[in-house]
């Protein structure tokens, strides 16, 4: 299996500066039982920016503080972001359980210490996997990202744990 990942380029659609941010807040805890992806997407970040869902474009990313995903993460909030076209989360660091869940979904979680000092909302950034950096294309500057293991890269490239395991079972 090839471990190459395509670079990501997009805007920072939102900056969540808070440490220990519980992803359930993305759609509101009161909506956690919803399962319809379109309904979830309409609720995304509404309490922070009522126009968020209308402003996001496919390829956008969000930037977050330390220990992003803290708490008891549910799938709905991240389904909402993916439905809107968010392609990755950049954070100072991640809560381990959340990080593993999203990696298993094939959704890039990019640990990049210092990212909150590098980006502002609507900046365009590039994640250059081979160089191991996140570049701010709007303001300049770059930071090292924490590299994935070969298996983690393959899982992201395959689109998640299940497709990754299917590929591994087919590969002699």
Image (cartoon, grey):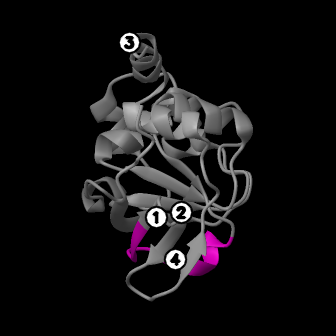
For label 3, count other residues whose C-alpha is less than 10 Å away and answer few (under 14), some (14-19) or many (20+).
Answer: few
For label 4, count other residues whose C-alpha is less than 10 Å away and answer few (under 14), some (14-19) or many (20+).
Answer: many
The quarter of the picture where the C terminus appears is: top left
**Residue drawn 34% across and 64% down?**
9
Q: In which quadrant of the rendered view does residue 11 lie?
A: bottom left
The quarter of the picture where the N terminus appears is: top left
Q: Secondary structure at mark 1?
A: strand
Q: Position of residue 79 (x, y in %)?
A: 41, 34
Which badge, 3 or 1, is on the more N-terminal residue? Answer: 1
Tell me if residue 117 is in the magenta stretch. yes
* Mark number, residue 119: 4
Mark 4 touches mark 1? (CB < 8 Å):
no
Front residue (pair 110, 45) = 110
Q: Secondary structure at mark 4?
A: loop
- Please state the extent of the stretch shown in magenta in the rendering: 114-126
Front residue (pair 79, 46) = 79
Q: CA distance from mark 3 to mark 1?
A: 39 Å
Mark 1 touches mark 2? (CB < 8 Å):
yes
Which residue is tagged 3?
Answer: 170
Which residue is tagged 2?
Answer: 63
- The mark closer to the camera, 3 or 2, is 3
Which badge, 4 or 1, is on the more N-terminal residue? Answer: 1
Tell me if residue 116 is in the magenta stretch. yes
Q: CA distance from mark 4 to mark 1?
A: 10 Å
Q: Is residue 77 visible?
A: yes
Q: In which quadrant of the rendered view does residue 160 lie?
A: top left
């Amino acid at each position: 299996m090839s471990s190459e990942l395509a670079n990501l380029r997009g805007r920072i659609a939102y900056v969540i500066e808070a440490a220990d941010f519980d992803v359930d807040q993305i759609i509101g805890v009161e909506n956690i039982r919803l399962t319809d992806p379109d309904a979830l997407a309409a609720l995304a970040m509404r309490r922070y920016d009522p126009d968020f869902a209308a402003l996001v474009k496919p390829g956008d990313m969000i930037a977050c503080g330390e220990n992003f995903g803290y708490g008891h993460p549910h799938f709905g909030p991240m389904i909402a972001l993916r439905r809107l076209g968010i392609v990755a989360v950049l954070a100072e660091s991640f809560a381990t359980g959340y990080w593993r869940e999203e990696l298993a979904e094939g959704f890039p979680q990019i640990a990049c210490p210092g990212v909150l000092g590098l980006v502002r909302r609507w900046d365009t950034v590039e994640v250059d996997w081979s160089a191991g950096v996140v570049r701010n294309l709007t303001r300049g500057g770059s930071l090292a990202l924490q590299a994935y293991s070969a298996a983690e890269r393959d899982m992201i490239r395959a689109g998640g744990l299940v497709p990754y395991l299917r590929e591994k079972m087919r590969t002699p």
